[in-house]
Amino acid sequence: MERLKTFAPYLSLLFLAAIVVITSHVTAKEYIKEQEYPFKIYVADNIYTITSNTIINEEGDSLTFSNRKEALKHLEELTKENIIKRIDTSKYHYTKASWYGPGFEGKKTASGEIYDSNLMTCASTVLPLGTKIEVTNLDNNQSIQVIVNDRGPYDCFIVDGKVKPYRPLRKHPDRLIDLSKAAFSAIASTKKGIINIKYKLI
């Protein structure tokens, strides 16, 4: 919890470059006054979710205050003199996507939820957990809405015929998203394996 109090950076500039489009710049205090709860705020390289009287960082650590006023006071002090970035949710981002399921069914995801390949979910190394996105297959223009509840895909190597992730884990160089089997099947055949997609926040 000590790291939460200082709100040390948790996201890289690559994260911001992947999902954020700057449409305008305002002070954090001005931005906060414009929002309806819950809302997200990007400050420097960090992202915070504010739900009434609680402030949550991207890692899921939280600080809860006695009331909303106290939470906002802390948030304004935290972001004092910082310039924040508004997000254009209409902007599409382009990458590749695959699907995962075998070996993960019934296991706990990064969000704490149990992985179910029949649900419309996905894993991402750059998007905050809980983010809802629209994914479109560029080959057939079919789209699906999914919720980010896991982390991945990660870069891997093959040893003795088995695929293993590098340690420490590192982002896959070509893919930013792995869809659940059901989500992938809704826009492509699982036999395809990897598809070119575009996605946007919704």
Image: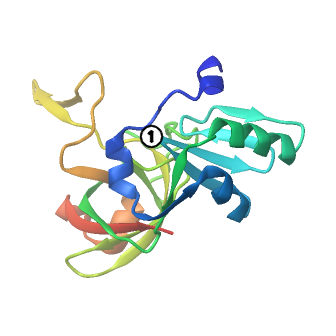
Residue 35 is at least partly visible in this image? no
Q: Position of residue 66 (x, y in %)?
A: 89, 37
User: Is 93 on the left-hand or right-hand side of 80?
Assistant: left
Q: Give neighbour class at mark 1: few <14, some 14-19, many 20+ (Cα, 10 Å).
A: some
User: Is 160 on the left-hand or right-hand side of 27?
Assistant: left
Q: Quarter-wise, where is residue 162 in the image? A: top left
As helix, strand or loop, the secondary structure at mark 1 comes to loop
Q: Quadrant of the N terminus?
A: top right
Scheme of colours in the image: rainbow
User: Is 91 on the left-hand or right-hand side of 6?
Assistant: left
Q: Residue furthest right?
A: 66
Identify the residue at horizontal 67%, vertical 52% (top origin). Answer: 29
Q: Nearer the viewer, residue 66 or 159?
A: 66
Q: Nearer the viewer, residue 189 or 34?
A: 34
Number of labels in the image equals 1
Please tell me whether residue 87 is drawn above or below residue 29 in the rendered image. below
Q: Nearer the viewer, residue 169 or 65?
A: 65
- Residue type beneath disc 1: Asp
Q: Position of residue 130 (x, y in %)?
A: 56, 52
Find disc 1 in the rendering and name its residue. 45
Please tell me whether residue 104 is drawn above or below residue 176 in the rendered image. above
Q: Quarter-wise, where is residue 155 in the image? A: top left
Identify the residue at horizontal 40%, vertical 68% (top origin). Answer: 200
Residue 163 is at least partly visible in this image? yes
Q: Position of residue 122 (x, y in %)?
A: 42, 54
User: Is 161 on the left-hand or right-hand side of 125?
Assistant: left
Please tell me whether residue 184 is drawn above or below residue 125 in the rendered image. below
Identify the residue at horizontal 30%, vertical 28% (top origin). Answer: 169
Identify the residue at horizontal 52%, vertical 49% (top origin). Answer: 83
Q: Residue furthest top?
A: 2
Q: Position of residue 176 (x, y in %)?
A: 30, 51
